[in-house]
Image (spheres, rainbow, N blue to C red):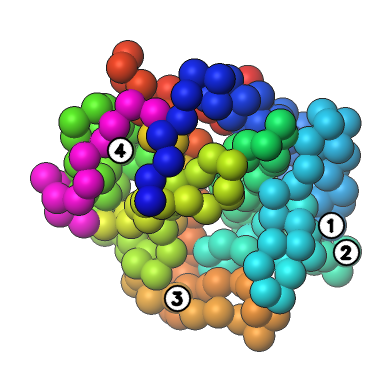
């Protein structure tokens, strides 16, 4: 069941989303060679805690996710577990997924960062992934269909020769971290449910430099590309309003 949000709900979601944006602002200057993924986790957890929020991912699912954020390197698509033993290296890309809950509502977003000097091929993957989100955002309007969002992402990324992950999707979000509807990053325009005012969506392209096939690692969480090619991730929480789309995970 899709839950439509009131103006007061959206206000609370903006506040939660601002906390998420503050985490990215803090992390951006810390992502460099030699930094451990656990140090990024500790910084993010501190920002969330100081804002009076809680980390949406901490303890989520089964087995319970151990971190406040997901930190995924290179071929890791999503759900990488922070560790003191994992140090960032020049030439890598690192995707950071952040969720925060404040006043009963969640904000959820992801960014892919470059670590030092990165190849032009990988740099372009990261940029196209980001731009595919904004292509989709153009369709977040009352009366459009969910498939319009999905097709916009797929068409843009596949036109660049990239793989579009099938098994993982965006999602509705609100008082629960994951709500209906699921939002695939591939699909057919003109299909799916119609968008209504008050819908809140976490739209998150997950795009690879190779094929779209993925698999789960033995830790029960980390998802990697089967061909070990790099993957990029870009996400925001978005509201459908009468005035068009509003990004809620922004400063």
Residue under numbered circle 4: 136
Residue under numbered circle 2: 84
Extreme residue toward the left, this view: 190
Residue under numbered circle 3: 214
Measuring 58% from the left and 49% from the top, which residue is drawn there? 177
Marks 1/4: CA–CA distance: 32 Å
Of helix, strand and loop, which one carries label 1? helix
Looking at the picture, how far across and down is residue 110, in whole percent?
A: 57, 45
In the rendered structure, which disc, 3 or 4, sits on the residue that comes first in sequence? 4
Circle 3/circle 4 CB separation < 8 Å = no
Is 86 situated left or right of 157 in this image?
A: right
Of helix, strand and loop, which one carries label 3? strand
Q: Residues within 10 Å of mark 2 (few under 14, many from 20)?
A: few
Q: Residues within 10 Å of mark 4 (few under 14, many from 20)?
A: many
Mark 2 or 4: in front is 4
- Magenta span contains residue 96: no
């Amino acid at each position: 069941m899709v839950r439509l949000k009131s103006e007061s709900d959206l206000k609370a979601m903006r506040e939660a989303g601002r906390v998420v944006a503050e985490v990215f602002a803090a992390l951006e200057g810390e992502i460099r060679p030699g930094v451990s993924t656990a140090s990024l986790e500790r910084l993010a957890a501190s920002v969330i805690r100081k804002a009076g929020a809680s980390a949406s991912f901490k303890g989520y699912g089964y087995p319970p996710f151990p971190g406040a954020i997901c930190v995924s390197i290179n071929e890791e698509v999503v759900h990488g577990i922070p560790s003191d033993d994992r140090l960032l290296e020049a030439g890598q890309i690192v995707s950071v997924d952040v969720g925060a809950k404040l006043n009963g509502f969640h904000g959820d977003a992801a960014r892919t960062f470059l670590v030092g000097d990165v190849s032009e091929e990988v740099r372009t993957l990261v940029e196209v992934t980001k731009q595919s989100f904004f292509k989709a955002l153009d369709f977040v309007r009352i009366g459009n269909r969910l498939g319009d969002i999905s097709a916009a992402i797929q068409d843009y990324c596949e036109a660049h020769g990239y793989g579009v992950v099938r098994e993982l999707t965006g999602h509705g979000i609100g008082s629960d971290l994951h709500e209906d509807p699921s939002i695939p990053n591939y699909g057919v325009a003109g299909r799916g449910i119609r968008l209504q005012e008050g819908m809140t969506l976490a739209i998150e392209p997950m795009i690879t430099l190779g094929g779209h096939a993925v698999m789960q690692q033995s830790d029960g969480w980390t998802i990697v590309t089967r061909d070990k090619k790099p993957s990029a991730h870009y996400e925001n929480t978005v509201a459908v309003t009468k005035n068009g789309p509003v990004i809620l995970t922004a400063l």
